[in-house]
Amino acid sequence: GENVEQHPSTLSVQEGDSAVIKCTYSDSASNYFPWYKQELGKRPQLIIDIRSNVGEKKDQRIAVTLNKTAKHFSLHITETQPEDSAVYFCAASIQKLVFGTGTRLLVSP
Amino acid sequence: DAGVIQSPRHEVTEMGQEVTLRCKPISGHNSLFWYRQTMMRGLELLIYFNNNVPIDDSGMPEDRFSAKMPNASFSTLKIQPSEPRDSAVYFCASSLLGPGLINEQFFGPGTRLTVL
């Protein structure tokens, strides 16, 4: 079955810096790669997703890149703000989502 | 739409008791997913349904866990008997799946279960 690895497990940045979170997956048939943000005590919420026929997608300060050959994808957050502090999960999917272990991002003012 | 609805939001019970968690998916979604989240194991898929039919229950921990979806607007996850190691946050999510196509999963607020 699919296996998703996510790094780093924790990431601390200063406000205004960029943050990058990386994930690798094992099943080359996976075709959908969402990223979820989970604030403390809240539900996971989708922030951006990418499908296997696209290499990059951007939405304001967040972007995701996908390298199908290498089977890895990354989340990029630019101009980080304190409200970006949360746990971020990547996932890979054919029909069901397999989640990474999460990255705790802390943005210090 | 009110989004995915789960009840109860919090449940505290004693070991050995039966626990039933409930979920109402978003109207029009054809797939429903039950997840368990713990610090140690992260976010795990327990089971998912498509058009009310269980498709993959390989994540269900053991026979103490069971899930049903009697109709398109309701699902239950039951634990009987409950054990302290079942303590976790249980999320229900729904989505619209098509042939070879997966879309965003919308998560409910979760049920925080504590088994004493």
Image (cartoon, rainbow, N blue to C red):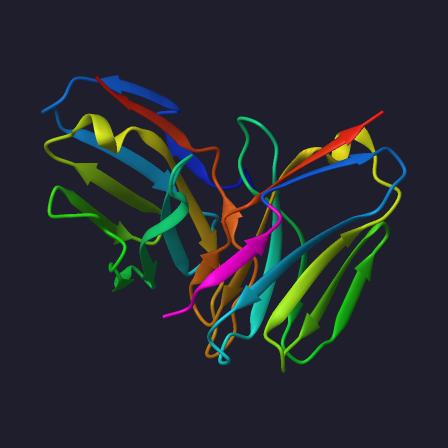
The magenta stretch is: A1-8
Near-viewer residue (B75 or A66): A66
Q: Where B47 sits versus A93, above or below?
A: above
Q: Quadrant of residue B84?
A: top left
Q: Position of residue A38 (x, y in %)?
A: 59, 38
The question of residue B37 being in magenta is answered with no
The question of residue A4 being in magenta is answered with yes
Q: Residue at x 85, y 49 (%)?
A: A61
Question: Disc count in the image?
Answer: 0
Q: Where A57 sits versus B106, above or below?
A: below
Q: Position of residue B102 (x, y in %)?
A: 52, 68
Q: Position of residue B48 (x, y in %)?
A: 33, 57
Near-viewer residue (A22 or A1): A22
Residue B32 visible? The answer is yes
Q: Residue at x 44, y 36 (%)?
A: B5
Near-viewer residue (B111 or A77): A77
Q: Residue at x 50, y 48 (%)?
A: A101
Q: Residue at x 51, y 74 (%)?
A: A30
In the image, is B89 to the left or to the right of B103? left
Q: Position of residue A14 (x, y in %)?
A: 84, 33
Near-viewer residue (B104 or A64): A64
In the image, is B11 to the left or to the right of A56? left
